[in-house]
């Protein structure tokens, strides 16, 4: 089997950032993803920001009323990156805690998957503010994901203001596993995600947010490997 035999869908979601030109960014990404079905997801009250997009799904913006760091246990290794992260964000008041509220992006993705009327072999989750660099061989990663179940997360390189800055970013692929799944882009098998499970965790106030949450719903229930890839995707700020 080759990657051409694998059905792939892309779901683009995340937080709308007013100063980013999404129409340009979407057009650039669409060229690389032209062989895949592409869906977009936002909140009902944000639809007006994406009125030129087809395949747009939406739901009511969820209200987050708990800090998942109060659910997440501090790692035993006090010197680990996870422990440092936990120490930082567990002390920030909930009303100011952007990471605690990052549960929303998982719920948006879950809603989108639940509303798609087709099944696929592999799904790619992409943030609205992420840009896939043209040298990335997606076909190779899709094939490995399909054959092994491996989940790929991407650690972004940040750039500001202009897409042309990507030319300054070197071509590189290195793997860094830190106990969570990086999320500016994620590649996983369609069957290795149950949107009802994610939504039930949220109802029970057990769903984590951000990178911890992605690992919780895409890796842990299926006992599969995951790899975080540094580079190849950039995030506009």
Image (cartoon, grey):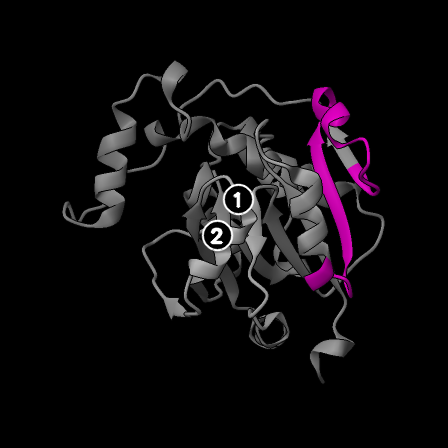
Q: What residue is drawn where x is 24% and y is 48%?
A: 81
Quick one: label 2, few (<14), some, or many (20+) residues within 10 Å? few
Q: Position of residue 98 (x, y in %)?
A: 42, 26
- In this rendering, the answer to whether 47 lies above or below 14 is above
Q: Position of residue 143 (x, y in %)?
A: 63, 76
* Placement of the N terminus among the 4 image quadrants: bottom right
Disc sitting over residue 165 in the figure: 2
Instruction: Provide the residue designation for mark 1.
Output: 162
Along the horizontal axis of the image, is 46 left or right of 216? right
- In this rendering, the answer to whether 79 lies above or below 1 is above
Magenta stretch holds residue 33: yes
Q: What residue is drawn where x is 67% and y is 58%?
A: 123
Span of residues in magenta: 31-56
Element on which disc 1 rests: loop
Q: Position of residue 206 (x, y in %)?
A: 46, 33
Towards the viewer: 147 or 44: 44
């Amino acid at each position: 089997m080759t990657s051409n035999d694998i059905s792939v869908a892309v779901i683009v979601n995340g937080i709308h950032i007013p100063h980013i030109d999404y129409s340009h960014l979407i057009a650039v990404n669409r060229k690389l993803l032209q062989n895949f079905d592409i869906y977009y997801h936002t909140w009902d009250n944000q639809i007006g920001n994406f009125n030129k997009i087809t395949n747009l799904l939406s739901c009511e913006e969820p209200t987050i009323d708990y800090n998942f760091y109060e659910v997440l246990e501090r790692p035993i290794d006090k010197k680990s990156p996870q422990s440092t992260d936990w120490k930082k964000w567990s002390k920030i008041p909930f009303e100011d805690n952007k990471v605690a509220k990052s549960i929303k992006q998982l719920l948006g993705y879950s809603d989108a998957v639940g509303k798609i009327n087709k099944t696929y072999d592999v799904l790619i989750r992409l943030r609205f503010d992420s840009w896939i660099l043209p040298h990335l061989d997606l076909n190779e990663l899709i094939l490995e994901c399909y054959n092994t179940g491996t989940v790929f997360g991407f650690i972004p390189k940040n750039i500001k203001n202009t897409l042309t800055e990507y030319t300054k970013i070197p071509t590189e692929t290195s793997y860094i596993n830190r106990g969570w799944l990086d999320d500016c882009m994620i590649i996983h098998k369609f069957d290795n995600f149950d949107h009802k499970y994610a939504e039930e965790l949220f109802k029970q106030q057990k769903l984590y947010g951000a990178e911890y949450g992605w690992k919780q719903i895409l890796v842990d229930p299926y006992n599969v490997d995951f790899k975080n890839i540094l580079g190849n995707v950039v995030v506009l700020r």
